[in-house]
Image (cartoon, helix red, strand yellow):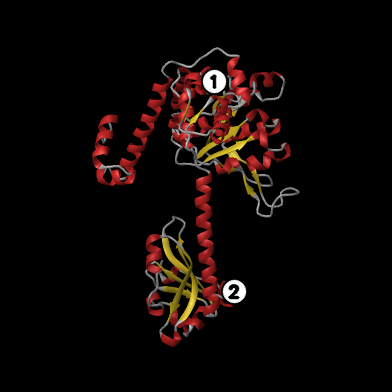
Amino acid sequence: MNAASFRLDDLASSILDTVPMGVIFCDRDCVVRYVNETYARYLGIQKKDALGRLMTDLIPDSRAGIVMQHGVPEMGEQCCIGQGKGRRTLIVNRIPVRDDAGEVVGMLSQSIFGNPAELKSLSDKIDRLDQKVSLYKTRMNTALAARYTVDSILGQSAALRGAKLHLLRYARTEAPVLLLGATGTGKELFANALHQASQRAGGPFVGINCAAIPNDLFESELFGYLPGSFTGATREGRVGKIELAHKGTLFLDEIGDLPLTAQVKLLRVLEDKLVHRLGASAPTPVDFRLVAATNRDLQAMMRDGLFREELYYRMAGLAIRIPPLKERTEDIPIIVAHQLSCMNTQVSGCSDAAMDALMRYAWPGNVRELSGVLGRAASLCQGKTIELGDLPPEIVAGAARSQPSLPPNHKALLADVQSNNEQRLILAALRENGWNMARTARALGISRATLYEKTRKHGITRA
């Protein structure tokens, strides 16, 4: 851009001369092509005397060249002009200007003048707002992150291994996945692990429990809304869960509770990859992977007209049945060992009688019920081992009505769990410390000789 190619009509110039901020524009060579009256007066020069001069002639530490080189705006920065008593403070926005082809052709600078104390207060407020935005972003990223991986799904039974194998296979696809399982079997755990094993692991994981949302709020929760779009809408509006899952995974737990109207709209989003906020005139493109879960018979619901066939068949192509705990009782010692190790107690295990009772019980609430029982038993336990008397009466009574199912090798299974946990801990510490044995030993609180012994024991080598 040269001097002849930049023109500003009289009306625009008059308007800019009246605004209570300084405006200056330079071309790609850092030559001033326009300055308004406010800025010229602040600099103590005539407008005509500024035109055609370099920015550094007027502002010695001008960042115009840097902003144009990188093409990135600098907003709300505090800077000073002049020396000694004539030194003045201002807040500056520096914005690269691009042509129709996207090339940077100049820079527009907006400067806010005022009392130095007031400007300092404004600058401090901007800094605090930036810190809050960063904090909220961090919290949002943490809140929208998947918490579990495939390794978090504990068990060695054939039934569970089959479900995990399907999970890993389906994770490589982009198609919707339907998780089928009774209450407490770990459907959310599987959904997290599916996300973490997929190519979308770096994106958000957004979960919503359809059974916990009133029918009249489904659409605003899923699709979002603009300010004032309906009675009761917040002034800020809301981004829907579908938009929050952009580039990641949307997990709809208990999808059988999704109202028919919301089912129709969800199906349309899956087909068009567009979401319409309530009150919006234009749709928003979205890119997400759907994972749904239910403990209900969706086929029976379809026959009764309570679930859309099109939505069901979109999800049911890739379905994973999560086995209930009563079908994988051999996993109970492994789960017990893990749960107890995560509790802040001195309890480290169960007696044979207690473990036998745990493995005979039918567990209608599955792993969730087992976790609750262990928490109660650990709080009642007087020593380091949970005894039969520490278990709830209904567990003992229910176990007495069942056939014994305690495998003869359950103690070996517990030893395997402890060994596997130790192996994962050592491997994680080695990676975190760059495979430096001395630093890793210090981090683990063991000697280097012990660390070498344990790496040989577990066959840990650097890949």
Q: Which residue is mark 2?
A: 15
Q: Secondary structure at mark 1?
A: helix
Q: Nearer the viewer, residue 39 or 196?
A: 196
Indicate the quadrant containing the C terminus: top left, top right, bottom left or bottom right: top left
Q: Nearer the viewer, residue 457 or 174?
A: 457
Q: Residue at 29% across / 30% down in the picture?
A: 458
Q: In this image, 409 relative to 207: left or right?
A: left
Q: Residue at 51% across / 83% down in the picture?
A: 41
Give, as a three-letter code, the residue at label 1: Ala
Q: Is residue 208 above or below residue 9?
A: above
Q: Is residue 118 above or below residue 169?
A: below
Percent x, y for residue 456? 25, 31
Q: Is residue 255 above or below residue 297?
A: below
Q: Nearer the viewer, residue 320 or 403?
A: 403
Give, as a three-letter code, the residue at label 2: Ile
Q: Which residue is mark 1?
A: 357
Percent x, y for residue 305? 72, 22
Q: In this image, 201 relative to 435: left or right?
A: right
Disc 2 to disc 1: CB gap under 8 Å = no
